[in-house]
Amino acid sequence: MNLQNHSYGIQDNSYQAAGELTGLTKLVDDFYDNMSTFPEAKIIRDMHPKDLTLSRKKLVYFLAGWLGGPSLYAEHFGGISIPASHQHLVIGNPEGDAWLLCMEKALEKQPYQEDFKTYLIEQLKFPTERIKDVCSQNT
């Protein structure tokens, strides 16, 4: 499917542009690999369990539904509010920036169209900001 003639964020166009589950799995694997190796990401890596298997699956499933694909997260884990699920953590600018850095560098490795990479990182800034807002209320 040639996505240059389709708008991201409509139906499953973004999910398709991300390579469906196979592409999202690669993205998430690269993301968590970055989180485990980038010194500036240690602060957020330490918020995760040692074994990232479930974290990886949850993020792949979440992104699948968030990008217009199948609602795998809800099917396997129930409903989710991203900000509420992070509210027990201390997340501010350094943590949000580290998360986005890991994702941006993971996106650079993907065979996605450049305009989709830009679109996706811009879209991911919104939940990052909401998480920081919710978490700042606890400090």
Image (cartoon, grey):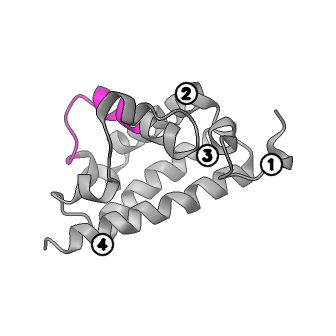
Q: Which residue is mark 2?
A: 21
Q: Are marks 3 and 1 in contact (CB under 8 Å)?
A: no
Please, is residue 6 above or below residue 110 in the view? below
What residue type is disc 2 on? Answer: Leu
Q: Give residue 36's mark.
A: none
Which label lies toward us, 2 or 1?
1
Secondary element at tag 3: helix
What type is the residue that disc 3 sits on?
A: Glu
Name the residue carrying label 4: 133
How far apart marks 2 and 4 lie (CA) works out to: 30 Å
- Observer-nearest residue: 94 or 116? 116
Q: Nearer the viewer, mark 4 or mark 1?
A: 1
Looking at the rendering, the stretch of residues picked out in magenta corresponds to 46-59
The quadrant in which the C terminus is found is bottom left
Check residue 57 for magenta coloring. Answer: yes
First in sequence: mark 2 vs mark 1: 1
Residue displayed at 18% across by 58% down: 89
Q: Mark 4: which amino acid?
A: Asp
Q: Nearer the viewer, residue 117 or 66?
A: 66
Q: Residues within 10 Å of mark 3 (few under 14, many from 20)?
A: some
Looking at the rendered structure, the number of numbered marks drawn on it comes to 4
Cα distance in 3D space between marks 3 and 4: 27 Å
Under mark 1, the amino acid is: His
- Name the residue tied to disc 1: 6
